[in-house]
Amino acid sequence: MSTTETRTIIVTGGSRGIGRSICRTLAEPGAVVCFNYFNPADPEGEAAAAEETGRIIADAGARAMSREVDVADPEQTSSFFKEVVEETGRIDVLVNNAGITRDTLLVRMKPADWDAVINVNLKGTFNGIQAAGKVMMKQRSGRIVNIASVVGVTGNAGQANYSASKAGVIGLTKTAAKELAPRGITVNAVAPGFIETDMTAVLPEKVKEAMLSQVPLGRAGTPEDVAQVVRFLASDNAAYMTGQVLHISGGMYM
Ligand code: NAP
């Protein structure tokens, strides 16, 4: 589909942070922006956050559809995507954004913390690509953008699970790009550095200062910094790019 005005877009983890900003940026008038979220520990908080994202999408003139769906669960993911296709007939863009951290040094890392991060960040991205890929293959078109991280390339003490999941996302992006290219589908990744969201707000001040000292551009990134690059990769302007990883880190990694 060449026009951006009637696209069906799915953003995983769209209720807050970078995902919300991506929803806002892709919410052109006439588009349908579908997103999910999953935080059973805080049902009221997640519902309020999802409502706010829904309002932002509607204010931009697009239609919002949101569901509480765990990306780590292939069945929940596939039934959400089926519902989207029943409603709109297609999936033009998938942004695999949902992600979590469970940071600690690897010798102390509990198996459950390893599993949780791999299941949401890596398996969740696989579940999304598989569910949307089948629809996009029939359409012979589609754009998939995966949110990796600079630490998937550099590694980071205290983030064995997270950096492994994001390195996995990069390998998965390249393989999916090769498999889906013959059907006109592009698959790319972005690798954000230190971005101001709830995920990084919990870090101790000392850790934040240490991270900022490694950023040549001298500031933390904003969710909007990431969303604008995702918007480019999801647009016709990026038609001849696939299997790429774009770093959005203020030069933290070159
Ligand atoms: P965030 O503010 O913590 O938001 C995470 C989002 O993911 C929320 O909408 C959350 O839903 C959703 N989510 C979490 N687990 C989920 C699950 N199992 N199923 C569905 N949705 C789920 O995080 P963020 O900073 O925006 O991060 C977004 C992405 O960017 C992640 O992949 C992260 O790894 C990546 N990233 C972030 C940074 C950074 O500095 N912030 C840097 C590099 C990469 P609820 O609202 O229901 O919890």
Image: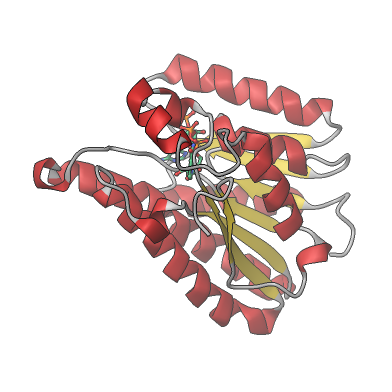
Residue 29 position in % (x across, y down): 88, 39
Residue 53 position in % (x across, y down): 66, 27
Residue 248 position in % (x across, y down): 59, 50
Q: Which of 242/112 is in front?
A: 242
220 above or below 148? above
**Quarter of image, res 183:** bottom right
**Quarter of image, res 146:** bottom right
Residue 226 position in % (x across, y down): 63, 44
| Residue 91 is at least partly visible in this image | no
Residue 136 in the figure: left or right of residue 70: right
**Quarter of image, res 169:** bottom left
Residue 25 in the figure: left or right of residue 98: right
55 above or below 115? above
Q: Which of 130/224 is in front?
A: 224
Tell me which residue sits at (47%, 39%) in the image. 69
Tell me which residue sits at (53%, 63%) in the image. 129
Residue 138 in the figure: left or right of residue 253: right
